[in-house]
Amino acid sequence: MSVVGIDVGFQNCYIAVARSGGIETIANEYSDRCTPACVSLASKNRMIGNAAKSQIITNFKNTVHGFKKFHGRAFDDPFVQAEKPKLPYSLHKLDNGNTGIKVRYLEEDKVFTCEQITGMLLTKLKETSENALKKPVVDCVISVPSFFTDAERRSVFDASQIAGLNCLRLITDTTAVALAYGIYKQDLPTPEERPRNVVFVDMGHSSFQVAITAFNKGKLKVLSTAFDPYLGGRNFDEALVDYFCEEFKSKYKLNVRDNPRAVLRLHQECEKLKKLMSANSSDLPLNIECFMNDIDVSSRMNRGHFEEMCAQYLMRVEMPLKVALEQSKLSRDDIYAVEIVGGATRIPAIKERIAKFFGKDVSTTLNADEAVARGCALQAINSLLTCIVLH
Ligand SMILES: Nc1ncnc2c1ncn2[C@@H]1O[C@H](COP(=O)(O)OP(=O)(O)OP(=O)(O)O)[C@@H](O)[C@H]1O
Ligand SMILES: [Mg+2]
C-alpha cells in the first residue's frame, strides 16, 4: 500500500509520493505530471483529465472545469451567481441549497454534486497513482486553499471518500509548499538559533495565497497567512478575452459572447498568448482560423499593453503581502527569502511586484507546479507514521 499527496488545483492536479529515493511526482498515461481538473460526460462514457480537456470545445455543455470553488457553497452564494453566466455548462440548485452541476450523461439529464465531480477526478488520480506505483493506493493527503471554510474542506473530504480514498489530512497549499522547502534544506538554524523566516507566495489559476514561515532544524512554524481568493491567472486570461471580444466586434462585426464555442477557443488562445508574453516582451500575434462564421481573425498584443489592461489585478498583489508581513510582526529585514510557486507567478509583472514589496529578488528554488503535491506527499508519510504509532 502506498500513501500519496494530491494537489487538486482549480486548473491543474498533481500527485506525489515519498519513496526511499526522495519525493517523486507521478506521471499519468500521457506521460504528463499535470492532470487537468476537468471531467467530460458523454453519451457512452466519461473522460477525466487530459482526455476531458480535449472535449472542452466539442462537448462544451457537458465538460466540467473550474468547479473547485463550488465546494461547500450555496447555489445562491454571490460567487456562484457571478460565475454562472460565464460557464459553458449549467449549474443547478440542489435540494439542500448547494451548487449542483447539470449535464447530459449516458443519454440522461443528470445533476451531480460538486463532491461527485471532484470524486470522479480523484478516482482518476487514484488510478494514475496505482498504475504508476503498481500497488493499491488508498491513503492520501489533499491540499486545500488556506481560505477554504470548514464546509468547503468537508466537501473536499467527502469527495475523497466517494473516490475510495482515505484522506489522512487536508493541508493548506502554502503549508505544503513550506514542507517541500524545509525537507531539503540542510543548513537550517538549530532550535537555539534565530529562525529563518521565509515567505511563500502561490498564485494559481484562481487564487493568490501568502504565508510567512519560521524554520529551525526539524521545526516549522507558520507565522501568518493572507490571501486574495479571487486573484489568479484566470483574471489575466479574462482581461485578454474581453479585449479581443471588443476588438473583433468592431473589426469583424462578430458577437463572440453569443457563441460559447468561440468564447472557449478564444480563452484557450488567450491563455497561450499570456504564457508567451511571460517570455517575450515584443509584439506577438493572435491568429484563429475559422473563428466564427468562417471568418479568420487576427490581432496583436504585447506585454506593455497587457500590463496596462491588467493594472486593476496587478494592484491587488500588494495587499495580501502587506497583511502577511504585518501579522507576522516581522520587518522586511527579517525575511531570508521569498519563494514563489504557482503558474501565475511566472507573469513578470507579478514577480516584479512581489520583489519590490519585499525589497529583494524572488527565489524559484521550488518546482512552481509540483511543490504543493510534494509537500502533501511529505505530510502523507508523516501522518501515516503517526497513525501507526498511535494504533
Ligand atoms: N509561463 C506562464 N506565464 C503566465 N502564466 C502562466 C504560465 N504558466 C502557467 N501560467 C498560468 O498559471 C495558472 C495555473 O497555475 P496553477 O497550476 O498553479 O493553478 P492551480 O493550482 O490549478 O489553481 P489554484 O491554485 O488557484 O487552485 C494558469 O492561469 C496558467 O495560465
Ligand atoms: Mg494551486
Image: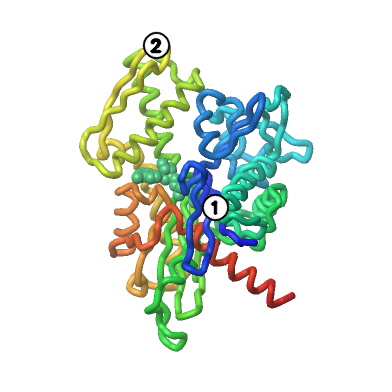
Between residue 115 and residue 163, name the one nearer to us: 163
Toward the front, the furthest residue is 134
Q: Closer to the camera, 129 or 232?
A: 129
Quarter of the image with the N terminus in it = bottom right
In-image side of 312 versus 168 (left or right)? left
At x 45%, y 55%, the residue is 370
Q: Position of residue 164 (x, y in %)?
A: 71, 51
Say which amino acid is labelled 2: Asp
Residue plotted at (31% across, 27% down)? 286
Q: What percent of the width, then of the height, locates residue 183?
A: 46, 71
Residue at the spot of label 2: 294
**What amino acid is labelled 1 in the image?**
Ala
The residue to which callout 1 is attached is: 132
Q: Secondary structure at mark 2?
A: loop
**Residue 192 image offset from top left, x and y in percent:** 45, 88
**Measured from the top left, where is residue 103 in percent x and y?**
66, 28
Q: Is tag 2's residue or tag 1's residue first in the polypeptide sequence?
A: 1
In this view, 244 is above or below 145: above
State the residue at coordinates (39%, 61%).
Answer: 366
Give the class, few, some or many, for how many residues have Cα within 10 Å of label 2's Cα (few <14, many ≥20).
Answer: few
Front one among 123 and 172 = 123
Q: CA distance from mark 2 to mark 1?
A: 44 Å
* Outermost bottom residue: 192
Q: Residue furthest left?
A: 282
Along the line of sight, which residue is nearer the eye, 201 or 49?
49
